[in-house]
Amino acid sequence: MKIVVAADNAGAELKNQLRDLLRADERVAEVTDLGVPDAADERPYPELGLAAAEVVARGEADRGVLVCGTGIGVAISANKVPGVRATVVHDSYSAERSVKSNDCQIITFGARVIGPELAKKIVSEWLDHRFDPESASAGKVARITAYEQAHSS
């Protein structure tokens, strides 16, 4: 699995910890870090969320992990990229359902909301979740995709 990670300066420290965890995980073939490297880099979260989502949309990464202060800004930004579904997660169940029920490719965290150990646990579990195209949720995801395709320019 190929993963892209990114964060603004509020989320840089947590992103770096999650990046290192992913790089050490045998289930992950490649981790692309789009930045920011530390809190001194002031690139705004929309730039980073959009860039990471574009990597996923192009098929250059299977999934993404984004971090900002709340996780909300990077999720909103990533969701503007056609074909991408991103959501904030702060517990194991929402991370599981984001993939199994909603086929989300990107999860986001709020560095000011979640502790690093819980975020690491969630990311580790998330790697094993897969969307079932035969599930009861598949039709709902298909409706979202159809709407997006009909309304994207």
Image: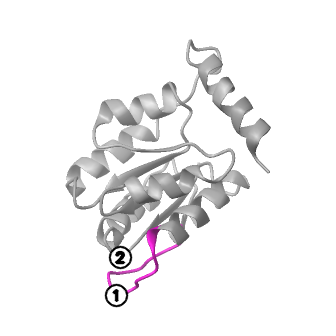
Q: Is residue 99 above or below residue 23?
A: above
Name the spot of residue 65 as percent of width and height, x first. Answer: 46, 55
* Left or right: 128 in relation to 150: left
* Left or right: 83 in relation to 108: right
| Magenta region includes residue 36 | yes
Q: Which of marks 1 and 2 is nearer the N terminus?
A: 2
Name the spot of residue 108 as percent of width and height, x first. Answer: 41, 52
Image point (23%, 57%), residue name: 116
Q: Considering depth in this image, is 39 or 70 the residue closer to the camera?
A: 70
Q: What element carries label 1?
A: loop
C-alpha distance separating marks 1 and 2? 7 Å
Would you call the spot at circle 1 few (<14 residues within 10 Å), some (14-19), or many (20 or more)?
few
* Left or right: 39 in relation to 6: left
Residue highlighted by disc 1:
40
Name the spot of residue 97 as percent of width and height, x first. Answer: 43, 28
Image point (30%, 63%), residue name: 69
Image point (56%, 49%), residue name: 79
| Magenta region includes residue 50 | no
What's the residue type where badge 1 is placed?
Ala
Q: Is mark 2 on a helix, strand or loop?
A: loop
Image point (62%, 46%), residue name: 84
What's the residue type where badge 2 is placed?
Asn
* Magenta stretch prevailing secondary structure: loop
Q: Give the range drawn in magenta.
A: 33-45
Q: Considering depth in this image, is 153 or 30 the residue closer to the camera?
A: 153
The disc at residue 9 is 2
Task: Say if mark 1 contacts mark 2, CB within 8 Å.
Answer: yes
The disc at residue 152 is none
Q: In which quarter of the image is residue 94?
A: top left
Would you call the spot at circle 2 few (<14 residues within 10 Å), some (14-19), or many (20 or more)?
many
